[in-house]
Image: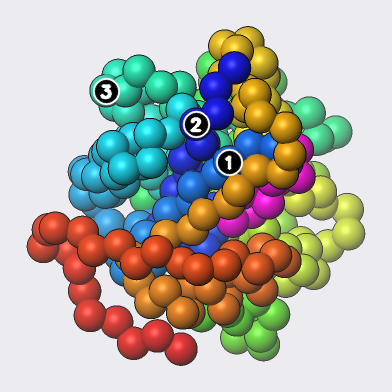
């Protein structure tokens, strides 16, 4: 048994979809969440750069918070860095891609599955590889959706503009006749109403959040790393962007008060100046 916290991270607010599933399934675990809002979006960046961000955040979680596990609650970062982080750290490292694929494959009836994600995730080929590794006879249609993440980070999840963008970006998936659509970016469940409206009622939207939480639970059980102490776990949040904005929008999206948000400053050349809403 191990009372250290679980560490998790995303480029911003998207990983809160996974955090919420984890809090609900494992209410006794302590969790530290890092939202790299100062450097989002990851999707359009070269994978090498995202890999460096993922290493930097994981090093912070391990060194400063002594986490017992790292959950990469971001598809782009998982596509870029999962293997490397597993190699570099002794603690278990969990991604969202394989859990999402398992959930989508079991949700489809007509064996036509769609995946939407960032440009980085889709062009990495990580989903195609994950489906192949499962040896499941599904036909996969992948579609990058640049722009979706920015809407979520601005807290704009149901506007007319995001609907218009979704109509345009999701056209190939409708044409492919998919009956299950995997939200292969952890920000996208916040756009589920819009995406669901555009795809129609016959298409099941699949998020990797629950399946990832189940994977975390089985690793904790199998390795004996579950928390020993009784009682509700403590959840801490840190952001490399505006801490007040993280607190405000994070609490709204998570449906829970995130409390005080630690402000992170990274060394490095990629910290852009931003205007916060
Ligand atoms: N939420 C992330 C993902 O799952 C990254 C989005 C972004 O920063 O572009 O891919």
Q: Is residue 101 visible?
A: no
Q: Is residue 63 above or below residue 197?
A: above
Q: Is residue 73 above or below residue 226?
A: below
Q: Relative to 152, is 105 on the left or the right?
A: right
- What is the C-alpha distance between the residues marked 1 and 2? 7 Å
* Between marks 3 and 2 in the image, the one whose residue lies nearer the viewer: 2
What element does badge 1 sit on? loop
Q: How many marks?
A: 3
Q: Residue at x 46, y 67 (%)?
A: 261
Residue 195 at x, y percent in the picture:
71, 65
- What is the C-alpha distance between the residues marked 1 and 3? 23 Å
What element does badge 3 sit on? helix
- What is the C-alpha distance between the residues marked 3 and 2? 19 Å
Q: Residue at x 35, y 71 (%)?
A: 241
| Label 1 Cα crowd, 10 Å radius (few <14 / some 14-19 / many 20+) | some
Residue 245 at x, y percent in the picture:
48, 79
Is residue 22 magenta-colored?
Answer: yes
* Residue bearing mark 2: 4
Q: Which residues are magenta?
A: 16-27
Q: Relative to 118, is 209 on the left or the right?
A: right
* Residue bearing mark 3: 88
- Mark 1 or 3 closer to N-term? 1
| Label 3 Cα crowd, 10 Å radius (few <14 / some 14-19 / many 20+) | few
Residue 62 at x, y percent in the picture:
34, 35
- Image-quadrant location for residue 80: top left
- Mark 1 or 2 closer to N-term? 2
- Contact? badges 1 and 3 (CB < 8 Å): no
Q: Residue at x 81, y 48 (%)?
A: 204
Q: Which mark is residue 30?
A: 1
- The N terminus - image quarter: top right
């Amino acid at each position: 048994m191990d009372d250290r916290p679980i560490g998790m991270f995303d480029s911003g607010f998207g990983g809160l979809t996974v955090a919420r599933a984890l809090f609900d399934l494992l209410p006794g675990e302590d969790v530290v969440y890092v939202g790299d809002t100062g450097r989002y979006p990851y999707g359009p960046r070269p994978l090498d750069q995202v890999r460096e961000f993922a290493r930097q955040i994981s090093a912070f979680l391990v060194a400063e918070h002594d986490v017992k596990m790292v959950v990469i609650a971001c598809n782009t970062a998982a596509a870029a860095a999962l293997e490397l982080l597993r190699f570099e750290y002794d603690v278990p490292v969990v991604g969202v891609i394989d859990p999402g694929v398992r959930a989508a494959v079991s949700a489809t009836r007509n064996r036509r599955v769609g995946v939407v994600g960032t440009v980085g995730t889709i062009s990495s080929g990580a989903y195609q590889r994950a489906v192949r590794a499962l040896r499941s006879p599904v036909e996969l249609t992948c579609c990058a959706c640049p722009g979706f993440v920015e809407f979520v980070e601005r807290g704009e999840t149901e506007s007319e503009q995001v609907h218009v963008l979704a109509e345009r970006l999701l056209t190939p998936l409708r044409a492919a006749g998919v009956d299950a659509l995997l939200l292969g970016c952890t920000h996208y469940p916040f756009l589920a109403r819009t995406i669901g409206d555009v795809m129609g009622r016959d298409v099941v939207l699949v998020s990797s959040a629950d399946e990832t939480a189940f994977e975390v639970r089985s690793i904790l059980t199998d390795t004996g790393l579950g928390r020993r102490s009784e009682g509700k776990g403590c959840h801490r949040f840190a952001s490399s962007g505006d801490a007040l904005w993280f607190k405000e929008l994070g609490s709204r999206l998570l449906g829970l008060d995130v409390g005080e948000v630690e402000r992170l400053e990274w060394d490095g050349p990629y910290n852009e100046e931003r205007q916060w809403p």
